[in-house]
Image: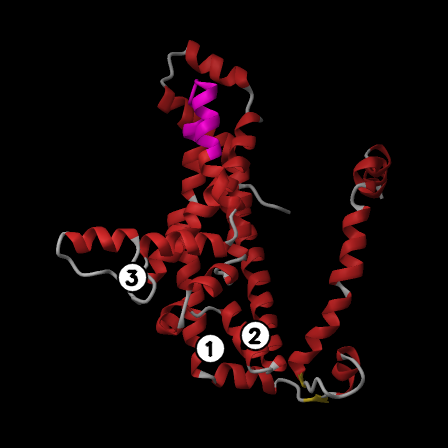
Amino acid sequence: MLKSKNSFGYLRKKYQLYLMLIPGFCFLFLYKIPSYYGLTMAFKDFNIFLGNNPIEAIGLSEWVGLDNFRRLFDNPDFFKVFRNTILISLYKIIYLFPLPIIAAILLNEINSKLYKKLIQTFIYIPYFFSWVIVFGIFYSLLGTYGLFNQIINSFGYKSISFFSDTKIFRGLLVATEGWKEMGWNTIIYLAAITSIEPTLYGAAKVDGASKIQQIVYITIPGLLPTIVLMLIIRVGNVLRAGFEQILVMYNPTVYEVADVIETYIYRMGLGQMDFSLGTALGLFNGVVALILIVSANVVSRKLLGRSIW
């Protein structure tokens, strides 16, 4: 009872914050929650030509239970796609997750405001490019007749097929995403650094701490809550390996190593109009993501004493 009174008192004191949630809740109720009805297609033999509209077609379609999931798991392509998704996501976490943290720490140590702004602008700009533009830039550099291959050809070496070599393509996905996304994530960590109490650095200087020691004992612990939050979110999205990026950059020659769950849903659900199978795969994706983010939160709370909830 006391806890309930305290909660009500906090709500009354901070009611402005809760009022700010109203637009977000309205968006969820109008655009997100009603769409969950479409998930029933995963348990039906959906026929879009039944009824007068898709919603009516869902209701009139035959209920088949878990048959779509059996078809999904019996399909040999599913495990290949699932493996590709996990591997590409893990590569991106291992190689790309630390980069914006390091970049933010290094930028924070730059004293020249002009030089700092130039570096920030340089690494932020790629984030605002669409994946079509990013593909065009890298294809002009690394394509069969791109600048890089022209240079190595002039030295008598053979061209490297960056976009069709199954041994290279995953590395290309990781490199291009790192180039595009690092700047935005750096902003998040820079903002977290600004919240660290400046007097801590002053006290450390008085005690004779070097720059490295200040980073290790002040900056990194101050960033830890943000790092944990971003890592939990990234683990929860491990089955989202980058739909737009891969859809734009891959081709049939690299399907074996680059076809992921989202592109497979796109090709099966829209390309072959197998909406029930595509929905089943999407629902599987969502359930696994929920399990991963809850598990990551529990592990973080037990090991680090920090969590989202």
Q: Which residue is mark 3?
A: 144
Tell whether 20 sits left or right of 78.
right
Q: Which of marks 3 and 1 precedes in the sequence?
A: 1
Task: Residue at 61%, 71% (x, y): give it.
Answer: 283
Task: Calculate the distance from the C-alpha at mark 2 to the C-alpha at mark 1.
Answer: 9 Å
Q: Quadrant of residue 55?
A: bottom right
Q: Amino acid at mark 2?
A: Leu
Tell whether 178 sits left or right of 148.
right
Tell me the magenta residue range: 105-121
x, y percent for residue 180: 46, 47
Task: Residue at 80%, 60% (x, y): give it.
Answer: 30
- Magenta region's main secondary structure? helix
Q: Are marks 1 and 3 in contact (CB under 8 Å)?
A: no
Can residue 110 be found in the magenta stretch? yes
Q: How dense is the environment of label 1, judged by Cα within 10 Å: few (below 14), some, or many (20 and up)?
A: some
Q: Which residue is mark 2?
A: 281
x, y percent for residue 222: 51, 30
x, y percent for residue 179: 42, 46
Q: Amino acid at mark 1?
A: Phe
Q: How dense is the environment of label 3, judged by Cα within 10 Å: few (below 14), some, or many (20 and up)?
A: some
Task: Calculate the distance from the C-alpha at mark 2 to the C-alpha at mark 3.
Answer: 35 Å
Residue 295 visible in rendering: no
